[in-house]
Amino acid sequence: MSEVTRFPFIDANPARPGTSMMPLLPLVLSEGRLQIEALGLLDTGAAVNVLPYSMGERLGFVWDEQKTPLVLSGNLARLSARGVLVSVSVAHFASVPMVFAWTQANDVRLILGQMNFFLEYDACFFRKSLEFDLRPKAAQ
């Protein structure tokens, strides 16, 4: 049995329907007993996973207690970030621990990047049909 699951692109700007269709993945982030549901942008060009500040707070992280500074690049280079470990659950797949660059900004998306989302999952994008497939590493 194939472990591939197909997801639709989601409109990131419902105020202007159809203008911002993106590969936004519904997932659950967990730290201890705390969980939040979120939409993560699959970004094959992002080097790391990025966690907005408010989501990190909701998971119980305290900025001054995080001792692993990270340097972001690109349009996020101006932001301070700390490394945090979060359990990520997607659809019916097993939870996977993932490292996130937790930034002090709230005006950024939850980003799923090369380190380590795309080390754990293969993704195949079908932009024309506004869908993408996801397969966990263990299913290969």
Image (spheres, helix red, strand yellow):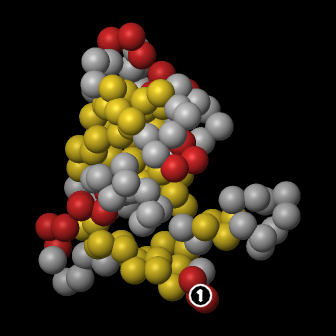
**Label 1: which secondary element:** helix
Q: In the figure, residue 81 lies in which quadrant? A: top left
> Neighbour class for label 1 at 10 Å: few (<14), some, many (≥20)?
few
- Viewer-side residue, 9 vs 52: 52
The residue depicted at 47 percent of the width and 27 percent of the height is: 80
Q: Position of residue 49 (x, y in %)?
A: 39, 47
Please say whether residue 6 is visible from this viewpoint.
yes
* Residue that badge 1 annotates: 129
How far from the left and from the top, in percent, is residue 76? 54, 42
Q: Is residue 124 above or below residue 102?
A: below
Q: Which quadrant would the C terminus be assigned to in this image?
A: bottom left
Which residue is the extreme one toward the right?
16
Locate residue 129: give its quadrant. Answer: bottom right
- Say whether residue 3 is left or right of residue 8: left
> In the rendered image of this protein, does residue 126 appear above or below residue 90?
below
Query: Could you tell me which residue is drawn at 59 percent across and 42 percent down?
Result: 108
* Amino acid type, callout 1: Ser
Residue depicted at 24% across the width and 61% down the height: 119
